[in-house]
């Protein structure tokens, strides 16, 4: 039911773990199952120098979080804001339709982190 890429990112998640001294932390919750996802970012010269995640959710949620960190790393903040849920699902060679809404919050978490970072910069 899952693509090889989903299984790969689930079994070998990239950039997993809390980031010390993150510049901002995005937080999204899945209202359906109650699971939680955190995306940590470090910013340098308006680019995402480092991205990591912690996900308390199902395997597909782990895989989407892992993939979003890979897609976002090295991108400018504007580019990262343009990463969509669909980009994440496409990069994983698709998600089962039933899992699409359940698990694919990673892009939202990334955007939340960037918005929080930008808010902080304004202050
Ligand atoms: Fe909770 Fe998938 S079951 S994120």
Image: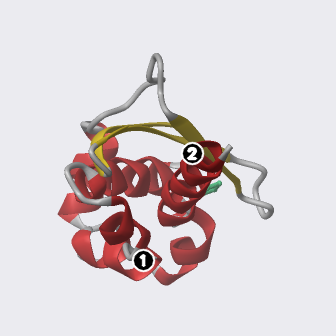
Numbered-mark total: 2
Residue drawn at the location 28% of the way across and 60% of the way down:
76
Circle 1 crowding by C-alpha within 10 Å: few under 14, some 14–19, many from 20? some
Residue drawn at the location 78% of the way across and 64% of the way down:
32
Please name the residue that numbered disc 1 is placed on. Answer: 84
Horizontally, residue 66 falls left or right of residue 33, namely left
Quarter containing ligand 1? Answer: bottom right
Q: How is the image coloured?
A: secondary structure
Circle 2 crowding by C-alpha within 10 Å: few under 14, some 14–19, many from 20? few
Whether residue 4 is visible here, answered yes or no, is yes
Seen from the viewer's position, the closer of residues 112 and 35 is 112
Locate residue 6: give its quadrant.
bottom left
Residue 49 on image: x %, y %:
26, 39
Horizontally, residue 14 falls left or right of residue 65, namely left
Seen from the viewer's position, the closer of residues 100 and 71 is 71
Q: Is residue 79 above or below residue 72?
A: below
Locate residue 91: give its quadrant.
bottom left
Q: CA distance from mark 1 to mark 2?
A: 24 Å
Please name the residue that numbered disc 2 is placed on. Answer: 121
For the C terminus, which image quadrant? Answer: top right
Q: Is residue 21 above or below residue 98?
A: above
Residue drawn at the location 27% of the way across and 48% of the way down:
9
**Element at badge 1?**
loop
Seen from the viewer's position, the closer of residues 23 and 72 is 23
Sooner in the amino-acid sequence: mark 1 or mark 2:
1
**Element at badge 2?**
helix
Query: In the orientation shown, which residue stands out farthest toward the front?
Result: 123
Q: Mark 1 touching mark 2, by CB under 8 A?
A: no
Residue drawn at the location 46% of the way across and 16% of the way down:
20
């Amino acid at each position: 039911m899952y693509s090889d890429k989903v299984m790969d990112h689930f079994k070998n998640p990239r950039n997993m773990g809390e980031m010390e001294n993150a510049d901002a932390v995005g937080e999204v919750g899945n209202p359906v199952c109650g699971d939680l996802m955190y995306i940590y970012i470090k910013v340098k010269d308006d680019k995402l120098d480092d991205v990591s995640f912690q996900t308390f959710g199902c395997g597909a949620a782990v895989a989407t979080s892992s993939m979003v960190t890979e897609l976002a790393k090295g991108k400018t903040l504007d580019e990262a804001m343009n990463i969509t849920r669909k980009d994440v699902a496409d990069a994983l060679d698709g998600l089962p339709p039933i899992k699409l809404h359940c698990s694919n919050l990673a892009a939202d978490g990334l955007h939340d982190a960037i918005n929080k970072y930008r808010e902080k910069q304004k202050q």
